[in-house]
Structures are given as C-alpha cells and as structure tokens.
Image (cartoon, rainbow, N blue to C red):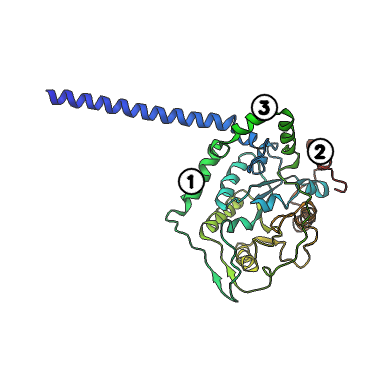
Amino acid sequence: MNKITFDKIDLKKLILSAVKVISFILIFVILLELFSMTIFSKSNATSYKNKFSYAYSYVNEADYSIDILAMGNSNVYSCVVPLRLWDKRGYTCVDVGSPRQTASMTYNILLDVLKRQSPKILLLDADMLYEGVELNTNLIEGEAAKKNYLNFLPYISDNYLSNAINQRFSVFLLHDRWKKILSFSKDKDKRKHALNDNANFDHGYYFNKTIKKLEPNDNMNYTKAVEEIPNEALIYLSKINDICKQKNIKLIIMNAPSLNTWSYARHNAVAQYAADNHLDYLDLNALDDYRINYNRDFRDQGNHLNYYGAKRATNYIGSFISEQYPDLIEDKRDNPDFAAWNTDKKRFIDFNKIKKF
C-alpha cells in the first residue's frame, strides 16, 4: 500500500515538473516572438547602424512591388544601385545583403522575402558561395580544388539551423539594439542622423563615394583550374535554384567586381554550374564588353565598389536584363502607383549630395 502511494506521489511530482518546464518553454518562446516583433524586429533593424540594416531593407517595401531581388554578401549591396535601375529602366529592385552572408543565410532570407514579394528576377552574387573560404591562388592548370565539409545532415546543418532560428526570432540577431536605444535617447540629433542614414529610400544599397586607386592583380588570369563550390554552399544554391523554378523567378548568377575575393578558378566552377542548370552568369570580372576602372571604381582594397563603380555595374546589369528579357518587367516610371520611387530618387540624390546621378 505504501509503495502505491509513493509511486502516485512521484508521478504527481513528475507531472508537475513537466508542466513547469513546458510552461517555462512556452513563456520563453512567446517572449522571443514578442521581442522579435517589436523592439528587435527586422523593420527596426533598418533604422539604426548594424550589419543587418541592409539585409532586412526588404521588409519596408510595399507588398508585391519588387521586380528584382539582388542577394548576397556585402559585394552585392555595394554593386547594385536600385534607384539607378529605376531611373534608367523603370525596374523596382531591392538589395538584400549583409557582411559575410552565406548561402544558407541567403536561402533562409529568400524564404522570408517570398512571403510578401513575387520578383521576376533574382540576382545572386556568387561570392557568398565561398564565404569564409580562403582564396586559393596556387591552383595549377587543369586542377580542381574541392572544398569538403562534413555534413551528415546537409539540409539541416548547423549553419542552416542557426540561420533558420535567427530568421524566426530576430532578437538573436539584434540583441545589442538596447545599447543603440539608450545612446539615441541621450542624443536626439544622433538618432535622427542614424535614421536618415538608414532610411528606406536607398532600397538596401550602401552608398560610398570614397575612391581608392588600385592596380589589377593576377587572380583573373585565364586558367583551366577549378576551385569547386563548397558542398554546403552548393546544396543551398541548388535549393535556391529549385525555389526560383517553382516560383517562376529568373535566376541570374552574377559577380560584382572584386580583386581580392574572386579568381578565374572560382569563375570556372560557377560558370559550369550555370551552364549545367541553364542559367545566365554575369561575372563582371571576366566579361569582354565590361571593363573595371581600377583608378575610380573601388572604395577599399578591391573588395567593394564605390558609387561610381556601382553606377557603371548597375547600368550594365540593367542593359543585360532589358536586352535578354525585354518583356519580362514592365517599365513603371509613369505608373502613379509607383510614384514613391521618384520621391526616393530625389531623396537619395539630395541626401548623398550627388551632382551627377
């Protein structure tokens, strides 16, 4: 009899403990959701200086208003000027990039973007496929360098899980926002400047007029060597390609000009993937009809374009899209529903003191 009573008591304690644990987890998840929707929301991330302010610029775009997504790491938001595409072609575009953005992170962000947008084109910068991989400049002719990673569960790898969680609960990405809030509350002018500096009129583009004169290096010398796409990046590139097929989105792989993160061996690997999957590939480092201006196009040691280089690159991309897909995107410059883009263009020019747009 005593044993039965003891077992019943233990069972009650076990149930009570389980209820407490489950209740704590539910409350914790609710709080994460609450903070992620308010103070630490993706929309708020665009209003102050942080590395995700450009990656989440898309959340402020009108629903189903974007023709072109430009996605990748910092190379892409330094290269594609959405308001230039608007001014010359009447295309609506948003840059969705962040420093060191990986293929798995891009995949997760793309899923989120497509909840409210139905773009016609995805411009995907291939530099992110080798994010975190040191550039191999010692490959010999005909050699293929394979970057192997241990992915026992490649579709739910550590990177994928962490990126998926961060996308679901943005509080993990933006947890240092409280420091910004405190500092801004003490200095309203500073807060006003930060908000203006990250306002949505740039549509995700990072404006910089700094000019760094450089000399070309040997990275883009022709070779048959191949630095193959890392396994995990290849998996998520293929998943992105699958989504584009399902959603009838034209996937265009591109490369912004880059002196220190790109090579002809990497170009060969991406070109082969594009050919195998019947995709257009625009490598602005290796085109016959596009030339980099090493005296004017870069703002640093050769990794990122300045505004002058980005303007030239964007002009080329816009011309390519117009010539190859003349009926894919409607010119919206005279459409009153998109008049805000003309206002954004004026704000962009005025705020950045651009004399010749």
Q: Secondary structure at mark 1?
A: helix
- How far from the left and from the top, in percent, is residue 183? 65, 31
Q: Nearer the viewer, residue 202 or 307?
A: 307
Label 3 or label 1, whichever comes before in sequence order: 1
Q: Secondary structure at mark 3?
A: helix
Q: What is the number of callouts on the image?
A: 3
- How far from the left and from the top, in percent, is residue 340? 79, 36
Residue tagged 2: 347
Label 2 or label 1, whichever comes before in sequence order: 1
The residue that appears at 80% across and 61% down in the rendered structure is 295
Which amino acid, mark 1? Leu
Which image quadrant for residue 316?
bottom right
Which image quadrant for residue 20?
top left
Query: Which residue in the rendered view is the most extreme toward the bottom?
Result: 141
Residue tagged 1: 161
The residue that appears at 46% across and 30% down in the rendered structure is 28
Label 2 vs label 3: CA separation? Answer: 26 Å
Question: Which label sits on residue 185?
Answer: 3
Q: Is residue 109 above or below residue 177?
A: below
The residue that appears at 24% across and 27% down in the rendered structure is 11
Which amino acid, mark 3? Ser
